[in-house]
């Protein structure tokens, strides 16, 4: 006998899910609303904000003041670039750990993750000195390197858990048929792991896009991504909520849209492996 | 062969020289996001007309992000910036470290003697001017003329704290969400401690005595904090321990504050009819005192300094001299009106009859002139700074003490406990840093 779900119960659960969803989305919604208000209206009480006039002034001003296109391209280059480099390193590494584990593989994985536990500011000065000496300050290439390294542990972990789900017998069969190491990774493993790789790729792009410590500290103008674009609109003394909201909306819009279109991939990838 | 080689060499030299003469120097200017700085970015045509060989690249950042970034860069001699926007807190510390280029050799037409003495004093270390002031600010009382009238009171130009208490009590009407006074309560060395350190000066309190011993166990700090908490709990808005400049600005503009004691720069916001519902009802007065000879107002100047590591000191100096010159003030006035001129740096500006028509001009100048960073409080102290102590340790100490006082305002700790904790943590930190032997 199948379990019956009453209409009221279903209704309550649906309403609760929508309420939680709305609650989580509300800050972003509020940012989007404030972006279309004048500075004077943006600091009014919430109800007064909603009833005040809508305007595009903030967007005009942000357009005039900042070079959005430059920051946008820097964000794209940094996030996509660092993700591709990280994948190129992480796929062979995760293959080795998943299919030919040694005695210390688990420890190695833990150790890699532990590097994420150190507060970034702790290595700010040594990193800054290295960047200065190698002439990498305010360069995209230097930042791609940093973003690759800080996200590498997560990429390896995610890929490792996906690869673990793939039966080793299939790879063995490929080897019996004479596939070399390169062919095994490229033609057997990778196609089977595509959903996992895709969701790793998407998640990592989002992480790199939002990274707001190193991208602020190590850039000034030429390599500055959207995080710096947002930071330039905040101030301890002044009226800036509407402009800041407009700038934030412009900064998160691309990644929000990317997330929307790849929602299915992301959810599938995240619930597929052991990272649940 | 020899001849052609010489010809080639000659041509190369000529090209290089020609190239050098044509070359553009690009300087990177780090700046904060505030109205006067943003306005300058739109008025650069005048600079480019005078200096066609210099190009300016702007890096605008939020104040705290900027402070961290330029501190990292200057301490490691990273050379990312050629001009820095820094405040009166950084200049004495960085100047002493040898991190800034001296500006004593600015051209005569710059007229360095025209700079307001209080501001210039805060930017000078051992006779060397280490930064040029772009705009200066103090703090003052902004009050609602209509509410004062309704209460049958008048605000003196130079009120005492007792006047403020009486006015706050008379204007408070909690049922209509009108609070007599709004003050900073959010923890932070540049938030509530900026206000409270300045207020404490007017009560004769000080951070340290001449032996760098913290003074929170004295009567003066207790009196300061007692009055502050009394004002805020009885006549202040709810949740005041989270309020900084921006929150109070919002409250005042919506007509919810009878008085607000804060930065003079707020005057242009609250009197702007575009943003403020009380634009035509605001009066100004000097920050209050207790008759001890010091007023409770601070002094700050956003200034332009040149890091010692820069390769482009000459171009940087040309820019700094232009941005802080008398001519720049005229450029702003001609394009945007006198009310939008960066205030508080030059004596000549306040002698200008056009500028004297701006409603808050005189009160801003009087406020700035009544603050002295080299003698901030009633007794002599070993430090420079009105609402801060210009030592590197102050950011950490000031914020920790600010958290104690903010907790006292929120009611999670008592006044005596907050003062005792402040005394303890400041003593520990100053001992560790080697000030207390």
Image (cartoon, helix red, strand yellow):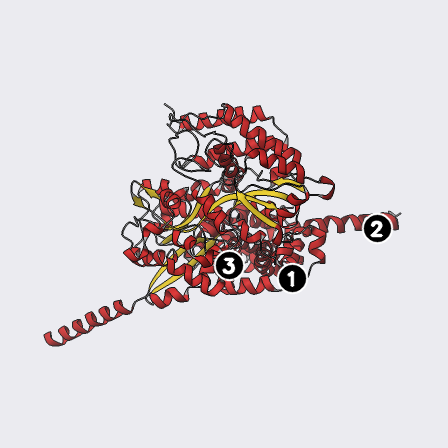
**Residue A113 seen anywhere in this rendered image of the structure:** yes
Query: Is residue B73 positioned above or below B165 on the image?
Result: below
Q: Earlier in the sequence, mark 1 or mark 2?
A: 2
Query: Is residue A129 positioned above or below B321 on the image?
Result: above
**Do badges 3 and 2 share one subunit?**
yes
CB under 8 Å between callouts 1 and 2? no
Q: Residues within 10 Å of mark 2 (few under 14, many from 20)?
A: few
Instruction: Please indicate whether residue B322 sits to the left or right of residue B271 in the image.
Output: left
Nearer the observer, disc 1 or disc 2? Answer: 2
Query: Which dot marks residue B434?
Result: none
Q: Chain of mark 3?
A: A
Element on which disc 1 rests: helix
Query: Which dot marks residue A75?
Result: 3
**Do badges 1 and 3 share one subunit?**
yes
Where residue B9 appears, x then y in whole percent? 17, 71
Q: Earlier in the sequence, mark 1 or mark 3?
A: 3
Q: Chain of mark 2?
A: A
- Label 1 – label 2 distance at C-alpha: 27 Å
**Residue A172 seen anywhere in this rendered image of the structure:** no
- Label 3 – label 2 distance at C-alpha: 42 Å
Where residue B323 appears, x then y in whole percent? 39, 57
- The C terminus of chain B is located in which quarter? top left
**Residue corresponding to mark 2:** A11
Element on which disc 3 rests: helix
**Residue corresponding to mark 1:** A261
Instruction: Please indicate whether residue B274 sits to the left or right of residue B40 in the image.
Output: right
Which residue appears at 43% of the width and 55% of the height? A220
Camera-side residue: A220 or A156? A220
Q: Chain of mark 1?
A: A
In the image as oriented, which residue stretches furthest toward the left?
Answer: B2
Q: Quadrant of residue B394?
A: top left
- The N terminus of chain B is located in which quarter? bottom left
């Amino acid at each position: 006998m199948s379990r019956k779900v009453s209409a009221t119960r279903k209704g309550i659960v649906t309403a609760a899910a929508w309420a939680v969803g709305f609650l989580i989305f509300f800050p972003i919604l509020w940012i989007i609303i404030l972006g279309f208000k004048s500075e004077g209206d943006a600091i009014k009480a919430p109800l007064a904000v909603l009833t005040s006039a809508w305007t595009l002034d903030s967007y005009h001003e942000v357009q005039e003041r900042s070079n959005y296109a430059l920051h946008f391209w820097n964000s794209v280059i940094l996030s996509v670039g660092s993700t591709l480099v990280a994948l190129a390193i992480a796929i062979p590494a995760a293959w080795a750990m998943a299919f030919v584990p040694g005695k210390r593989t688990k420890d190695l994985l833990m150790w890699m993750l532990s590097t994420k536990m150190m507060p970034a500011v702790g290595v700010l000065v040594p990193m800054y000195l290295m960047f200065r000496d190698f002439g990498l300050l305010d360069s995209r290439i230097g930042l791609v390197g940093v973003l690759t390294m800080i996200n590498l542990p997560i990429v390896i972990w995610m890929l490792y858990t996906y690869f673990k789900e793939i039966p080793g017998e299939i790879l063995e069969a490929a080897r019996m048929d004479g596939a070399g190491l390169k062919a095994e990774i490229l033609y057997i493993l990778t196609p089977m792991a595509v959903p996992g790789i895709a969701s790793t790729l998407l998640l990592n792009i989002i992480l790199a896009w939002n990274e707001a410590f190193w991208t602020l500290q190590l850039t000034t103008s030429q390599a500055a991504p959207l995080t710096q674009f947002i930071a330039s609109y905040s101030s301890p003394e002044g009226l800036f909520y509407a402009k800041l909201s407009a700038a934030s909306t412009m900064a998160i819009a691309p990644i929000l849209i990317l997330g929307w279109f790849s929602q299915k991939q992301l959810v599938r990838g995240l619930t597929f492996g052991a990272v649940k | 062969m020899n001849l052609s080689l010489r010809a080639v060499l000659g041509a190369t030299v000529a090209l290089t020289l020609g190239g050098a003469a044509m070359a553009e120097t690009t300087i990177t200017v780090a700046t904060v996001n505030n109205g006067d700085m943003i306005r300058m970015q739109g008025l650069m045509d005048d600079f480019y007309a005078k200096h066609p060989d210099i190009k300016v690249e702007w890096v605008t950042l939020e104040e705290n992000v900027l402070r961290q970034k330029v501190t990292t860069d200057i301490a490691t001699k990273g050379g990312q910036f050629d001009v820095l926007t820094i405040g009166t807190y950084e200049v004495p510390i960085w100047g002493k470290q040898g991190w800034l280029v001296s500006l004593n050799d600015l051209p005569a037409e710059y007229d360095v003697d025209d700079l307001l003495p209080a501001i210039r004093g805060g930017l000078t270390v051992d006779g060397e001017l280490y930064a040029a002031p772009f705009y200066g600010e103090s703090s003052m009382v902004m009050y609602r003329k209509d509410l004062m009238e309704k209460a049958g009171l008048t605000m003196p130009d130079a009120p005492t704290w007792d006047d403020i208490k009486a006015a706050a009590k008379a204007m408070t009407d909690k049922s209509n969400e009108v609070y007599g006074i709004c003050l900073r309560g959010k923890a932070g060395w540049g938030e509530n401690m900026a206000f409270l350190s300045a207020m404490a000066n007017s009560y004769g309190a000080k951070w340290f005595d001449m032996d760098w011993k913290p003074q929170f166990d004295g009567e003066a700090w207790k009196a300061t904090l007692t009055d502050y908490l009394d004002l805020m709990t009885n006549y202040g808005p709810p949740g005041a321990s989270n309020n900084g400049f921006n929150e109070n600005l919002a409250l005042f503009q919506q007509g919810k504050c009878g008085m607000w004691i804060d930065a003079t720069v707020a005057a242009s916001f609250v009197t702007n009819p575009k943003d403020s519902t009380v634009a035509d009802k605001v009066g100004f007065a000097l920050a209050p005192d207790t008759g001890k000879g010091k007023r409770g107002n601070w002094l700050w100047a956003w200034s332009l300094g040149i890091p010692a590591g820069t390769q482009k000191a000459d171009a940087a100096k040309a820019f700094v001299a232009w941005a802080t010159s008398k001519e720049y003030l005229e450029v702003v006035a001609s394009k945007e009106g006198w009310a939008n001129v960066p205030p508080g740096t030059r004596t000549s500006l306040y002698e200008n009859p056009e500028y004297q028509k701006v409603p808050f001009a005189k009160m801003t100048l009087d406020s700035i002139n009544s603050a002295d960073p080299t003698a901030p409080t009633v007794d002599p102290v070993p430090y420079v700074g009105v609402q801060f102590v210009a030592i590197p340790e102050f950011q950490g100490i000031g914020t920790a003490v600010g958290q104690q006082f903010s907790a006292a305002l929120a009611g999670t700790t008592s006044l005596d406990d907050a003062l005792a904790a402040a005394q303890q943590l400041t003593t520990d930190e100053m001992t560790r840093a080697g000030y207390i032997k």
